[in-house]
Image (cartoon, grey):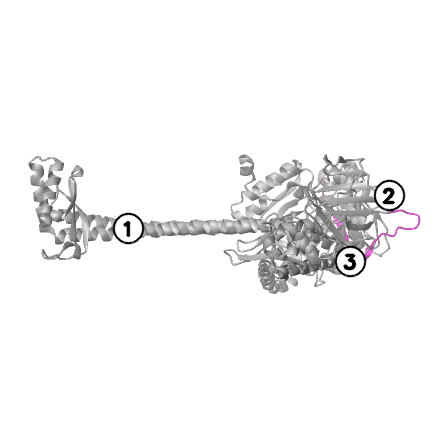
Amino acid sequence: MKGRFSLIDLLAVVQELRQYIGMRLNLIYDINTKTYLLKLSKPDKKVMIIFESGIRLHSTDYGWSKNIMPSGFTMKLRKHLRDKRLEDISVVGLDRIVDMRFGNGPTACHLIIELYDRGNVVLTDSEYVILNILRARTIEADNVRYAVRETYVVEVREFEEYRRTADEEMASRLLHACQPGDTLHKCLVPHFPYGPVLLEHCLLENKLSLRMKVQAVIGDQSLVSALALSLSLAFELFEKICNEPSRGYLKMTVEENTAGERIEIFHEFHPYFFSQFANSECKQFDTFNGAVDEYFSKLDSQKCQQKQLQQERAALKRLENVRQDHEQRLANLQADQMLKERMAVAVELNSETVEQALAVLRSAIAMKLEWFQINEMIQDARDLGDPVAGKIVRLCLERNAFVMRLPVDVFDDDQELGDAETVDVEIDLALSSHQNSRRWFSQMKESALKQKKTIAAGGKALKSAELRTKEQLKSTRQKTNIGKVRKMFWFEKFHWFFSSDRLLVIAGRDAKQNEILVKRYLKPGDLYVHADLRGAASVVIKQSEDKGPIPPKTLNEAAALAVCLSAAWESKVVTSAWWVKHDQVSKSAPSGEYLKTGGFMIRGKKNYLTASQLVMGFGLLFRLDSESAARHLEKRCQAEDGLDGEEANCDNLQDEQNKPRKLVTSELSEQSFNSVNSEEFSYPDVEIPLDGLKLESEKETQHEEEEEKEFGKATAAAVEEEEEEDDDDEDEGYDVNVVQNETLDAIQCLIGNPTEDDNILFALPVCAPYAALSNYKFKVKLTPGTTKKGKAIKTAIDLFMQDRTAWPGLREFIKVIQEQDVARDFPGKVKVSAPNLHSVRKKR
């Protein structure tokens, strides 16, 4: 596989990246010690540029897992580059060095990325004085030192022949400067910046090749002319790549795994469709940047797929070896039976001859002759033409036996022995000819019985091996999906869950997120839920597509979330929450008053709900592929259709009982929901004494009057700067349609109870009111307690891993869940409750 950029790759990418000049650098992330992400934006667009020291540089549309804590080098880059505009990006000379200039004038900074050798990343000021460097180094030969406070000196490779006119004279001069035994590759590549791939293309266009010897070209003037044309074509193509946007091409091979799935394995990426790839399968992209992004984003997964194919082939080979071994055993037993049957038949047909041989040998042994004397006696008789002695092959007197070569068919004395089919039979001197025949028939029956048992046992072993191989193949295919980088859903920055009615409920983590939640995501038809407690979160129930009333069950679950995320959790105070419509929430304060961040005015009547219990749950959702998700959606639709008739019959009976709730929910609407992932959770106002709780249960008057009440959380803790920047960024690029489509996709593809037939992509942890997790396969109950967050998470994961209903592939997805991903949504101090929890703790 191609592992790094060539010069023409870099020139093609930089040509495309120049379209981002003028965008502001919002933030810098580090993926590892060599790979970094630059987040650029302008009011109507955002872009992420990824670069890896010594390897690559391009923009990316994929989600990349970033380090939780930025490195010191990253913090230094943020300090000098953040909020500056990208003013220029260029390739230094004709080397693989990129200079990105942020800002203008004396405050400008240069981010220099070296993509040759071991690579480097250098931050300099406007005068190229190094402010920070990823890898300090010294070039002893030139006495140049690259370190902080030193001046950055650019090493530029010179190509003497590059700018000269390509003609026959130049071609001839290059050829004569080389040894006759050198190839054109060694002759041309060091003198031009084109690279071997582009040169090979141009030579092939003129019936030449880099593998040709110099002496073969020098002696033919037509080949020298073709070489000159090739160099001229190379210059034109090189200039085109430098100055014009290029399409992208990925050279690949396509293989199929045992499931019949098509697997694409990328090998190389290029900004031009070169002639040498005419017979290879290639994937075309509209931009070279898109091709490179696709290549590197799938590099790890394709390595996993290749490993999967190797494991599948190894497993199938083992199965084939078992099958071949079984068949070989049966074939050997069958051949042994046939041989022993022929031996028994031969003894039976030649019983008189066998008896004569037995008599002669017994007589010799009775005379106490030495073994060599008996051999000499038989040899003498054989020389004299004795027919019985002629059929004795050898003596085995050490085990009281001898071997005779007997015809299997009826044999006349006048017939030559070589003309008939014969078999060598061992004759026991202690047995008669008939007893010897029966002995071989008995052994034949034993062999037949052994064959029968082998067939039975081998069939079971083969079936077991096939099942084991099938499990291995299934496990291997599932493991390939694990660890793939996924793009986060928009709502994962908040607290979130899917209600029992499949609606998305989201809540802010702090005052700033509460502000964003109401300002950006509270839309017509949505409901706002809150509790009159310090630290209570602002909760939004998103309306569904059918715009029907939001069910009371979802309201109660949202209310439980608002209460559990407040100071009531640690103080163990049970209270109620309330809801209002979207148009009752306002950020406009009355004249002379001030609303803090996260505080809002509520105009009109608050609809109080019943007291919410302090019971949360932790469970797992599983992201399915589209085919598996469609299967689950169809099952849900069938189940809902079956319940419609029952609900219609119950409406009249429950009319009186549900009257108050109908008043509460008569003008509500439903909305879709989505999947989760979150950032570090904080409770800025939770650490307060019990007497700090403020309950407001004022009764509403019969006539409606406008009520204006400020509520919300004060910002007591600093928010992570990455989170702040993400929020500011999204304010500029928020798209309602994208949010709706992504929410609908999550509702359909995130399932709490997968089956073995489902193709699972990843597992997603979720903390929600316990009532919302009723249909989840993996869940535990959380109540206020004394167990610390980390220990509680480990206990829950261990419980899920030991679940007997979880198949091996499913456990692999649970195993890769990171504790920090769960801790963001987990309550502070809890008590974990679940069936079989005692046995799990005992094992630990």
Mark 2 or mark 3: name the one nearer the start of the chain. 2
Mark 1 or mark 3, whichever is nearer to me: 1
Residue corresponding to mark 1: 333
Mark 2 or mark 3, whichever is nearer to me: 2
Residue 743: x and y in percent read: 69, 57
Where residue 523 is drawn, which disc sits there?
A: 3
Q: Quadrant of residue 396?
A: top left
Q: Mark 1 and mark 2: span between their CA atoms?
A: 89 Å
As helix, strand or loop, the secondary structure at mark 3 comes to loop
Q: Nearer the viewer, residue 12 or 504?
A: 12
> Horizontally, is 713 left or right of 190 in the view?
right
Q: Mark 2 and mark 3: span between their CA atoms?
A: 43 Å
Residue 34: x and y in percent read: 69, 42
Mark 1: amino acid: Leu
Q: Quadrant of residue 644?
A: bottom right
Q: Nearer the viewer, residue 3 or 549?
A: 3
Residue corresponding to mark 2: 107
Mark 3: amino acid: Lys
> Horizontally, is 839 left or right of 648 in the view?
left
> Horizontally, is 470 left or right of 161 in the view?
left
Residue 230: x and y in percent read: 67, 59
As helix, strand or loop, the secondary structure at mark 1 comes to helix
Mark 1 or mark 3: name the one nearer the start of the chain. 1
Boundaries of the magenta span: 573-595
Residue 396 on the magenta segment: no
